[in-house]
Structure formats: C-alpha cells, structure tokens
Image (cartoon, grey):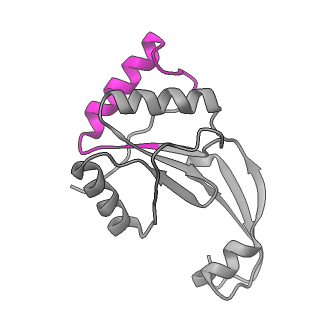
Amino acid sequence: VAALGIQSTLPCVLYNGAVCYAFPQPCDSAKDAAARKEELFSLGIDLADAAEVCAFAAERGLLVQYYVGDHIYVRPTCDEHRDLVRRYHELTGASHTSVEEYPLTESPAKMLLMTDDPDGVLSTVREAQASGALPSGLASIRGSPPV
C-alpha cells in the first residue's frame, strides 16, 4: 500500500473478500500502513466450520493455512508440509507462524488447503461438501500455484 504512493485513503478487500481495511494515506512504510489501518468489515469463518476443515485436512494429510488478522498459522507435520510453507513464502513473501494446534478460538478470515494437487483436493472437498462431510456454506476455490 505504501509503495503505491496514493494520497487518499485506500480501501483494500483481502482474504478472498472476507476482510476490508481502509489504509489512510500517505503512509511511510508497510509497517506504518499496518499500524494505521481501519477495519471496515470482517466476515470470519464460523469456528465450528473451521474445526471441521482442520479435522478433514488432518485426516487426509493436508496442510492448512489458517488466517487470523495479519497472521498465517500452519501446523506442518512432515517435510512435504514444510516445503509447501517454504515455497509459499518464496512466492508471496508471507510469513507463517508454526503451531502445535490451530487457534480454534479465533475465527479465521480464510483457510487455505496447501497441496501440489489442487484439482484433486478441490474435487475431494466439493464431494465432501455435497455429502455433508464438510460445511456446504464455505466457498471452495482452486488456487493457482505455479507449476
């Protein structure tokens, strides 16, 4: 936001539409922008739904990115998970906080199932939603990882 050099307040919709912040301008740095942002709205994922997604992912050996505020929580349990986190960091610059358990007392704005098989996982998720094994009200979106 700071690098854009815009002189008026900049609204930004984040986390696939779950959160909107207004960033007062001008700002000196990313740290300044983050410190002065104003939340316009936030539509977090229901905690029960978040717990179901985490359990579903754990049963299938998938890694979840659990977004709360400006933090991305991950629970890597194997080298493949750690590699996915490393690659995501290299791609986006995002930092992750590794945890033993996801913070299921805090509603996430977004949850991302990390995988090298996005089509297969999306199909599995949609089947689980259709059968009632996962909440049907959650949006399932295929990401675009680099090849």
* Quarter containing the N terminus: bottom right
How many numbered callouts? Answer: 0
* Position of 51 relative to 131 (above/below): below
Q: For this view, does 113 lie left or right of residue 22?
A: left
Relative horizontal placement of residue 139, taking residue 20 as reference (left or right)? left
Q: Does the magenta stretch include residue 127?
A: yes
Closer-to-camera residue (140/45):
45
Residue in the picture at 33% in, 68% down: 90
Q: Give residue 118's quadrant in the image.
A: top left
Is the residue 123 above or below the residue 108 in the image?
Answer: above
Left or right: 144 in relation to 133: left
User: Which of 12 and 33 lies nearest the eye of the viewer?
Assistant: 33
- Tell me the magenta residue range: 112-137
Q: In which quarter of the image is residue 124?
A: top left
Q: Position of residue 127 (x, y in %)?
A: 37, 18
23 drawn magenta? no
- Please state which of residues 46 and 23 is positioned toward the viewer in this rendering: 46
Which image quadrant: the C terminus? bottom left
Outermost residue, front direction?
Answer: 100
